Image (cartoon, grey):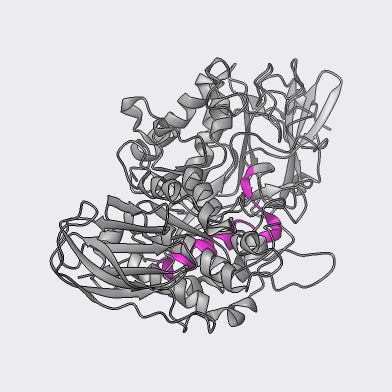
Amino acid sequence: MLTPEENIVPTSQQTGMGSIVFPGGVTFRVWAPFANSVAVAGQFNNWSQTANLLTPEGTSGYWSTDVPGAAVGQQYRYVITNGSNTLWKIDPYCRAVTNSAGNSIVYADTFDWGGSVFQMPAWNEMVICEIHIGTFNDPFPITPPQPGTFATATTQLPYLRDLGVNAVCVMPIHEFQGDLSWGYDPDDIFAVESSYGGPDAFKAFVQAAHANGIAVLLDVVYNHFGAIQDADYLWCLQSFDGWAGNAGGGIYFYEDSRSNTPWGFRPDYGRPEVRQFIRDNVLMWLSHYQVDGLRFDSTVNIRNIYGNNNDPANDIPDGWGLMQWLNSEIVSNLGQPWKITIAEDLQDNAWITLNTGSGGAGFGSQWDNSFCWPVRDALIVADDDQRNTAAVAASISQCYGGDAFARVIYTESHDIARQGQSRLPIAIWPGDPGNYFSKKRSTLGAVIALTSPGIPMLLQGQEFLADGYFDDNNPINWGELQTYGGIHDLYRDVIQLRRNWFNNTRGLSGSNVNVYQAGPDDKVIAYHRWNQGGPGDDVIVVINMRNVGYDSYTIGLPQQGTWHVRFNSDYNGYSSDFGNWTSYDTTASGGPVQNMPYSGNIGIGPYSSIILSQ
């Protein structure tokens, strides 16, 4: 048998990290700066700890070797020694694993994308649906629960296309422990969750989405790795190369007060190798998987120790600088400025979406909780007199840094609908999402979100009153689509207007809004949306948040002439218990009202909305 010294070969000339396939073999490269030795053991060498030793690449902390005969699909691990400790580790850069507690798999990017080129929708034209692969379309009613997969989710993409959705925001899909998870406990951030189908299945999902005209935005988690309770997390709590430091996390993590989050260890954003690790992950999703954007989970916990916008003493400058670098790299390295990054910061911080040249973090948009909660609160409260129309008006008008589309707006998200919270119809009328008031007021929220400036987002199943709360073992009940098909049609009709399908509501995708009425007594809100203005562009949205209808209600109008009703949410085709209140075309023949140059009369039903344009 050869001694370890005789097995050492020159470092590889192949570039890249992890397992890199070349004709006749595989290169393995890993960062382990405190290791005494590193070997790769796998099916290609009968799991020998000595047959394939890696060579240190100078003093960089990187190790590599070429293994002739190793092949795609074979399993492997790194065998790292540090003093008397021998650690068997999954490859942090591996693209596929048997499972989170199993082995790395040699993977080659040979997926055939075909010749089609996808044109991502303009940001001001996007309508997003947030989906969770495990519960979006789960046809496996078995015990123990089994999650849906990329393949089962793919079958519902034509449905989303026909609804008018042109972007999906996919909750995290990197490998996590077990088969059921929200995805916010990443074990292996380069590997695609094996229970969902693995890397090629995700590529097929992206390809199918693009074929249906749907952009794919992917949720990524960089504020922590692993989960705080995961004692066996393979390169976290045990440390990766045997060095644990003061906090015990090892080379990828902070070793001081910055290390802990409520969910797991925080990466060391100041360490070049860790920054490169995260940067490589970002570019991998955008290039190799051809996703069209990324949603960054809890960016406030990347930039602040305690996730507090008002606690500058505990800010993490390295985290802020990392986010700036990542957003700059997407433009400079990939040359893809149209791909969007969305921050879940939830702190109403305009600097998040300002460009990096101005000192901002450089995100294209951010989730806007300051829209969600005032609108939800106004819809949930039982007493009409308590509805805060002024707060709703402020939510409609909110803008970050002068950019109307620097916010993603919604009334439901996975966080809002989690256990302890609920879907909006249930919050309005607990136990009965099909109640008249649940249907009426939840759809008012949808109309507000879909007609306000910003990028509107739905949560999976929202359009047919999916009830209960969001959880990873609570799949969408597609049978409710039959029960509430009319509500689905309501959503579809508003989305079509939002996207100007009929070339008469262009203003809904514009930047401009004027909320010129938010009556504290009658609870009627009216706002003007426009892009350039004029026929086919100017849009008026009227929201009645009281259980009283009006046969003739005077509103201000921006232009003379006839205004046509394009949508009436009280149409009884949407639900048989809706009143079908007469909402008629009107002529702007009156004088100035509510600081608008003209006026006209409208009809609007209780808890209803209408949309008018010329």
What residue is shown at x 69% (from left), y 56% (from top)?
Answer: 194
Q: Look at the magenta stretch and give its main secondary structure.
A: helix
In this figure, what is the number of numbered marks? 0
614 displayed left or right of 167: left
Q: Quadrant of the C terminus?
A: bottom left
Is residue 472 among the parts visible in the rendering?
A: yes
Where does the magenta region start and end? 189-213
The quadrant holding residue 527 is bottom left
223 displayed left or right of 586: right
362 displayed left or right of 472: left
The quadrant holding residue 237 is top right
Q: Position of residue 119 (x, y in %)?
A: 33, 60
Foreground of the two, 467 or 218 = 467
Q: Is residue 422 magenta?
A: no
The quadrant holding residue 165 is bottom left
What residue is shown at x 30% (from left), y 39% (from top)?
Answer: 402
Q: Quadrant of the N terminus?
A: top right
Q: Position of residue 586 (x, y in %)?
A: 22, 74
Foreground of the two, 475 or 497 = 497
What residue is shown at x 67% (from left), y 42% (from top)?
Answer: 186
Is residue 120 among the parts visible in the rendering?
A: no
Foreground of the two, 566 or 22 = 566
374 displayed left or right of 265: left
Q: Position of residue 514 (x, y in %)?
A: 28, 51
Q: Residue furthest right?
A: 84
Classify 498 as above or below 316.
below
Q: Position of residue 167 (x, y in %)?
A: 44, 60
Classify 40 as above or below 528.
above
Classify 462 as above or below 434.
above
